[in-house]
Amino acid sequence: MTGSDGAGVRVAITGMGLVTPVGTGVEAVWESLSRGRSGIGPITQFDTSGYPTQIAGEVRDFDPEQYMDRKTARHVARYCQLGLAAARMAVEDSRLRPSTMDPDAVGVVLSSGAGGMEEIERGHRTLLDRGVSRISPFTAPMMITDIAAGLVAIELQAGGPNYAVVSACASSGHAIADGFEVIRRGDAVAMIAGGAEASLTPLMIGAFCQLSAMSRRNQDPHAASRPFDLGRDGFVMSEGAAVLVLEEMGHAVSRGARIWGEVLGAGASADMYHFTAPDPEGRGAARAMRAALRKAGLGPEDVDYVNAHGTSTQLGDIAETLAIHQVLGERARTVPVSSTKSMTGHLLGAAGAIEAAACVLAMDRGLVPPTINLEDQDPQCDLDYVPNRARPADVRVSLSNSFGFGGHNASLVLGRGPSANAKGA
Amino acid sequence: MSATNPAPTGEPLDFSELQRMAGEILGVDADRVQLDVSFARDLAADSLDLVELIMAIEDRYQVSLPPERLEGMRKVGDLWEFLQEQHGPA
């Protein structure tokens, strides 16, 4: 922990925990991403009769009691269960033991876009059907969006800075950016940072149906998320959680931690354009990417891979393509760009973190995960999107984008760890 | 957090049912729920847990615990006694 301006402080990634529609745990997720497997299927969590969209990326066979006691599992919303599971995995992976450290040393910034949606809906139904006296006393703590961060602090005894950052689909991009800055300014040695989302609920799916934002390819779920393809018809909502352990580099090295990678820079901006539509020219997104590269002290020529926000919406994919052109210039013609949402669907507030993990794994394994379902590329999307098959590549630096409703933009620049298995590393 | 179906009227009270409900809601084995155990000390139940349990009991037995009596619910026996008062003995 050096100076307060962050200069010279490096931030390592020493642990990762993933609970996603394409698998639970780092290796299971990588197996799916590297083989181009979709995690999208019919929604089973409620009756979708009458819904134009009936598909999503669900986390299947999740048993919360593997990660917390029965009573805790009963008293937290599903997004918290997923978030705690991912946080436990990440901290175990890092071999950090927050409970044995100074209470200020390890903090938590764990985001969610929507929080405990199912508890809001359940509580409201109870209120209408049975009156105020029948609302569960746990409804308030279960529904709020910040409580996953509090839960992780209690369960893992991590007493440093603790909160959630909320910026819709950019939430966990911002969470990792914030964790990085907390460590850089010396307020913690390590931060448990990421996102958790479980909002595949009747109201949430219905609300997004009304926005005409989601794919209606109900008969062919695996093909529904198709970023940059002419046949795309919206994003596919998913649930899950992804958590990284960020750690001051000197601390990580001195305890002999495995260093998966490094956060090199982070940038954020606002579109200043519209609640739900992106700036069609991608100017806000471009400013976030530039800011992240500037903080990392890197230029366009240094970027070896871009993990796109790439949600599979008409406007978003084009705007992001334009933004990448603006920022990377000549480099944009050759840099591999892929959207792992083609496989995972859109984890909303957990998307930034699962995609940061995808970048770390791409660098570690020397393999860029593909954009699947890219069969008929939109001529307005003219980058190299690594169609359908993973591609071996020597990736030292990755750029990861996350954009959210409200015009929130977050970009991360991530670097390869010293022990990467990459060819030529 | 599921609503409980009311017990049929006239059905006798069953302590093992209270044990089962308390065990489920408080996250403990049902056989630890005995008349002389303290909710807070022995079953690690905080005030929110107790409110949740009492709501489930109210739904099940169609009774209503006056708020001023909540304070007195320290042991499982206190709750059982209240139920017997309301419902008639087991």
Image (tube, coloured by chain):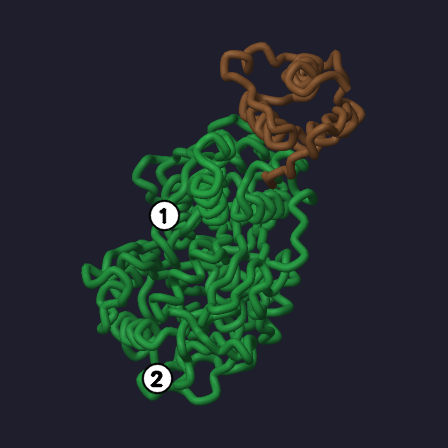
Please report the residue visible at 62 percent of the width from the left and 69 percent of the height from the top: A32
**Can you say whether A357 is above or below A103 in the image?**
below
Shown colour of chain B = brown
User: Given the image, what chain letter belongs to the residue carrying mark 1?
Assistant: A
Shown colour of chain A = green
Which is in the foreground here, disc 1 or disc 2? Answer: 1
Nearer to the camera, A117 or A235: A117
**x%, y% of residue A246?**
49, 46
**x%, y% of residue A295?**
31, 54
- Mark with earlier residue (1, 2): 1
Say which mark, if any, is on residue A113.
none
Query: Which residue carries the number 1 mark?
Result: A166
Query: Which residue carries the number 2 mark?
Result: A382
The quadrant where residue B79 appears? top right
**x%, y% of residue A244?**
52, 49
**Can you say whether A356 is above or below A49 in the image?**
above
User: Given the image, what chain letter belongs to the residue carrying mark 2?
Assistant: A
* Real-space CA distance between mark 1 and mark 2, rounded to the nearest whole angstrom: 32 Å
**x%, y% of residue A24?**
63, 57
Please report the residue visible at 49 percent of the width from the left and 67 percent of the height from the top: A345
Question: Which residue ends up furthest to the left in the rendered image?
Answer: A272
Q: Do callouts 1 and 2 mark residues in contact (Cβ within 8 Å)?
A: no
* Residue A110 appears in view: no
Disc 2, SS: loop
User: How many other residues sit within 10 Å of disc 1, few (<14), some (14-19) or many (≥20)?
Assistant: many
Please report the residue visible at 55 percent of the width from the left and 57 percent of the height from the top: A418
Kind of residue sitting beneath label 2:
Asp
Q: Quadrant of the N terminus of chain A?
A: top left
**Can you say whether A196 is above or below A396 in the image?**
above
The quadrant where residue B56 appears? top right
* Residue A231 appears in view: yes
Kind of residue sitting beneath label 1:
Val
